[in-house]
Image (tube, grey):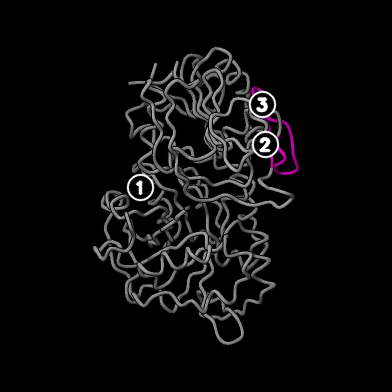
Amino acid sequence: MLSIEILSLGIGNVDSVGCWLESNGYQVVLIQSPEDSEIGRPLVIPGVCSTLELSKRIIQSGLHEVIAEKYCSDVKIMGICAGFQVMGTHTTEDGGGDCLNLCSFHTNRLGKSGISYNRVGWESLDLNLKGKSLRHIVSPNYILRGKAFYNQRYGVEGDQNTILKYDSDFSAIHFSKCFLGLQFHPEKSGALSKTFARYFDEN
Amino acid sequence: MRTRAGLVLIYEQEILFQSYGGSLRPLGDFSILVGSLQFHGVEELMIIVTGDKEKNFQALANDLKNTYIDIPIVISGLNGDISNYLAINKSVERFAFSSSALEGNCKLVDRVILDCGRQAALALLPIKYDKKSLIYQDLSGEDIRLSEKDICQFFHKYDEIIFQYLVQTGLQAGFDYEVLKFIPQKFLSRSIFSGGIVQSDVERLFSYGVAAVYGENSIMHGEGFYES
């Protein structure tokens, strides 16, 4: 049984993500410090939290070095919502501050023409990734089709490695090295949830 | 189109209930419920915890840890208690505050916003109305008038507001559209409505641009409440 690490720093829907992975046949390992982690083990960084607060806790725990090492070593990492955003350079949330600076994008308040908005709800996904950049880590038949659940006030901008955008400027799916960043919640996306869990299976 | 057809349930003594004609009807435990959600096309689940809060929050936390639910969960009934929040916070996506929302200075609301982000904090307003305004119906039975300014302040603090029209909650009476008149148009996209909803209301309320519609009755009885 494949073991997958989940970042567990007292915030985020860690147990929801754990239930999702276990229901898809994985063993879950919660990590709170660098000592809990093994370099070759895939990692999920959950969302449902403030990106700035998550960034602070990751740095305080020393896990930023673990994440950086996994990222540079092409170990699979899935970042969900704030767990996606925290990989960027900085965020404007909660007064603004630095993130982990592993990816070149940044996080900003959702908005157009100076009018901010929130994004909560289900959106249809119909994405055939055959021949796309994900192909070397997932099956050639990896097709995302269904509805995904979004719940956000902030989004990722300036993403050079996005494979799906929304509202023209913001990134819904990011892929670089073996980091899959998802702005929506795969663990809460109904029938589509199973498809996303397959990410950890494919070679 | 984003549709968010949700379901409101009540949790007490390790059993889930639904409001039904002014009383509570037991639905059974989580394993029974989870198998039915997808079949009925439920896209969000709000669980209101009542009774002995400490005991029931702990029991619910255990149920959620042991049962995978693949749709977002909103929890209400915290009443400002930090220990109940900490028991449940890793298993849910959003929190709806009722009496704490009225107090306006609840430390737990601020804690939720800090921990989970502002998108995780909702207000749940049990309401009725008269000719002048919406009226918040407190658990103690006290009526509190809500001016348009009050409603705007709620939207300033909370990501979305659930307006639970108590007069028709648990009845298949159809939603009372007069409620919409008291809510500024610009906030409808952040408003969730509940109370007496029947199938035809789901589509009609979405046509007004509302954020979501929550039913509380009939869905588990095969009346074809939602399109699946």
| Magenta run includes residue B114 | no
The disc numbered 1 marks a residue on which chain?
B
Point out which mark residue B63 bears.
Answer: 1
User: In the image, what residue type sits under mark 2?
Assistant: Thr
Residue linked to disc 3:
A100
| Magenta run includes residue A95 | yes
Query: Position of B143 compared to A189: left or right?
Result: right
Q: Position of residue B214 (x, y in %)?
A: 43, 63
Q: Nearer the viewer, residue B119 or A63?
A: B119
Secondary structure beneath label 1: helix
Give the foreground label among 1 and 3: 3
Q: Nearer the viewer, residue A96 or B29?
A: A96
Residue linked to disc 2:
A107
Q: Quadrant of residue B191?
A: bottom right
Which of pointers 2 and 3 lies earlier in the amino acid sequence? 3
Q: Which residues are magenta?
A: A91-108
Q: Are marks 1 and 2 on the same chain?
A: no
